[in-house]
Image (spheres, rainbow, N blue to C red):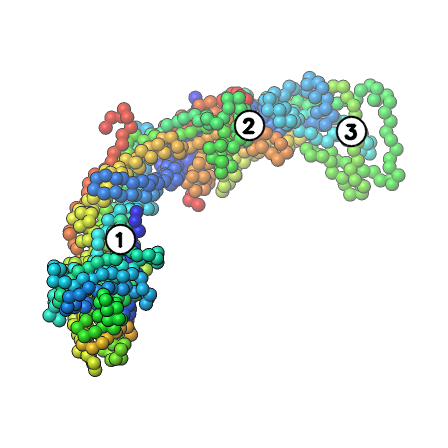
Amino acid sequence: MEKAIINRGTILQNGFDSGRLTPLCVVIHEFQSAGEFQGKVYQDDRPVSNFRLSVNKNSTNKQVNIDLATLTPEEPRQSGAQPQARFDLQPGGNAVFYVSSGRGGNAVTINQIGLQSFVVFDSRSLDKGDIFLVTLLRPGQYQLTNAITKIESQVRVNYPIAAGAPLKKLELQTTSVGPKQFGTASLEMQAIQGLAVRCDTPSRLTMQITQTFEKPPAVTGEGEIAKTMGIPAPRPGKVTWRKPGTAH
Amino acid sequence: MSDLTAAFGEKGVEALFKGVVKNFVLEKAGSTSGGRFSAAYDVKAKLENGTISLTNQNTVKISELDIHWLRIKLTLKVDIPKICTPDGCVDIFGKEICIPQWCIFEANPDIDITFDLSTFIRHSEVSGEVSPLVRYFVNPARSANLGYLEAEESQDPAVPDDPKANLANKWQVFLEPIWLDVDLIDFEATVDELLTDLVDTLVNTIFSGFPDWAKDAILAISGPIIDVIGAAIDLVDDFQEWLADFFNVSIGLGNILITLLVDYLANKSPIISLEDPLKIMDATNTGLIPVKIPIAELAANINSAEMVVTGTVGANLGG
Amino acid sequence: MAFTDHSDVYGALNEAGVNLLIQHVQQQRPSLFNYGTQQVLDKLKQNPQILCAPIQAIPNVSKRNNPLIGVEDPLVIPGTDNQLAISYLAQLTQLQLDLYPGEVFTLPSELSPPLAEQHFALHVQVCGGIGCPTKDFLETYTLPEPNKSGTAQQIIPGILGGGLGLPGGGGKQQPTVVPFDTLTCFCIDLFLLGHFKPAGGTIELLLQPDVDGVELVDIAPTGLENILECMMVLIIKIVVLPKLAKAIKEALVSPLKDLKDQASLTLIPTPTPASVPNNPAVEDDQVKIFVNLKEV
């Protein structure tokens, strides 16, 4: 039997950093112009792999999802050239950088090929138009901070309510971060909702829980959901054994 | 004519019978495959209480002999489906972005979930009718030329931990079943209670050690786990019926219990056991041998008032 | 009418069974019924014919070095200052028990036949013998001088179990035992009348025999008969009867022991006269016991 592996660290995460992505975080960058780009993936600030991104009008992709987990090898690569992952995108399309599994701690930089010093994207310092999206599971009071400008906002995440059916669509709350302030001074949202923050200024966004909320008494959990399907009638019937040769 | 007569009224017979059944244990584990899916079971039961009545047909009627399920565990191999945040595209600041899913399990596993159903099982009983059967037992480990004194002094190799177990011959009176009925296994809980227990066990198994908010958050994503599991194993609507069929038909637990009980009463556990020859004076610590009398014959009969055991003292002791 | 109309459990052993049981005890524990000196035992090993009555024992008795006779101290000859003693042999043979109503044998008139209700009678052939001195011994033996302290030691020969040194003595001396070639024997019939006391509160006190009368047949004068009857009563009542009663009790209680072991029940004698008129009962040529069950 294969053991059920649950990413406990991810589920119990109580802090997020756009510069150190985990499975509950996503950053989105729009590539407006065509070009050939080299991406570098980091884990814990250490480069771990490279990839190629081609933004060209021949691409049919309006969006490319780049999984940093699959680009993070489990063991250090041997020296020598390794085949690079390749992605392509239409100009104006969006690259979505995410972590599908593992402990995360990933960052990504994109350089235009031929112009190595020209960094078009650095997830450790999001630029105007970039979006940081985080799915919040843990209920509590969070402090949302732009580590570059030090401005703050408050986000309250309420206790999750068990759904009567599987969640069909991830609902989002949105806000933005500008040079002087966040779009909203405080936000209230439900657990398992997503929070999308649009950067209008260079940003490194962190969210840190400052107060946890425990399960309130009245919250309906799975065990209390009534699925009464009627009390079954008593089942008659016995198993009978009779000594061979004896009359019934 | 018999030399020795012993008679036991109904109270005495009931005491003898209860003394025998209290040592009966059904303990069995196994698994079945095929059918809808694989399941394993681990059961243990004892017998308790019960009343008897004596008849003029040389039988004892037994009723209300309770089956006490000490353990009735079912292990289901559950193929946990993916539980993920929904995929799909959302509008974010005027852009349509398709958000990648995040899944709770990093692999798509099977999990063994073990449920203890002993609190749900409906009260069940054994009833029947038994008749006395007298046998003369010669221990197979006893050699033919072993004297009666040496046999008493020799340890029965089949029971090495019991210092009283020896190789002496024995007259034994069994209560041989004529017929036995066992109630089918049935579960008293509503489907709701069973499913609740299943869900609780499943969630606690999978998310062992997680705080409540984490379990609730995951449940909020996945919806009722029972729907998830039920969809995977397709038994939500008839779980209770499936449970009963599993134990009664697939395993045949009732048949197993009856077969074991028949053998136990008829062959393994006599209600009366007399060594032959019968000791009437102990050996002394100065080396004097015990004094024993041979029992040439033994018989047992039952009428509506009592069980009467008669015996004949033999003239010769033998070797 | 059921056996257990007045008790939870009933047990009975009939006359033939009791007498067969006594026979088995005699053959497996001969030293319970035959007593003599070491000298008799030594002679017996060389000459089995020396006994007053033959002893029938099963092979296991000799195989396991069990004695045929219980060894006792010799009888000291009075006036010899514990310096001379004589060997003896006492045997209880042909024991027969008769349970009410008496049919096995006829009681002597001294015991007021017929056998009364709830009574039993025991017929025993008592054989005895002493090792009379040889002619040579009588002609040559002289008693040694008393010890220098001038005190005389009086040793009372025990009935069963050796002598006692009285105060004033310096310790037990071993007397010279008169040598003998054969035993001078006699056998007489003894009849004993008895009953069982009401059972006590525990199974151990179920069968407690008591002696109502004893008669040795054809002994004269009366005083000698009385002395011998007195000795026989002591031996039979104190030693033999209790052991036989215990053996009968074991035979009766054995089928019940499973109740105690498996069902955790205590067996207690059914009380009289509340539940049964007699317990144990001696009637219908049987010894009957009545037992109740009590949860531990």
What is the chain identity of the residue bearing mark 1? B
Distance from disc 1 to disc 3, alpha carbons, whole Å, reads 104 Å
Q: Quadrant of residue A28?
A: bottom left
On the rendered structure, is C57 left or right of B18? right
Residue farthest bottom in this picture: A180
Between residue B109 and residue A116, name the one nearer to us: A116
On the image, numbered disc 1 is attached to which residue? B107
Q: Amino acid at mark 1?
A: Ala
Q: Residue at x 19, y 41 (%)?
A: A236
Task: Name the side, left or right, on which A219 lies relative to B21.
Answer: left
Screen quadrant of the C terminus of chain C: top left
Task: Please count the marks in the image.
Answer: 3
Distance from Cα at disc 2 to Cα at disc 1? 67 Å
Earlier residue among tags 2 and 1: 1
Q: Position of residue B240 (x, y in %)?
A: 20, 47
List x then y, in percent, for residue A218.
Answer: 22, 67
- To the question of a shared chain for discs 1 and 3, the answer is no
Q: What is the residue that sits farthest to the top in this orientation?
A: C49
Circle 3 SS class: strand
Residue A48 visible within the image: yes
Instruction: Chain letter for mark 3, please.
Output: C
The secondary element bearing badge 1 is classed as: loop
Q: Which residue position holds label 2?
A: B150
Q: Amino acid at mark 2?
A: Glu
Q: Quick one: C85 or C78, which is closer to the camera?
A: C85
Query: Residue A109, percent across and down?
Result: 25, 67
- Residue at the image point whose x is 26% and y is 66% from the top: A108
* Residue bearing mark 3: C85
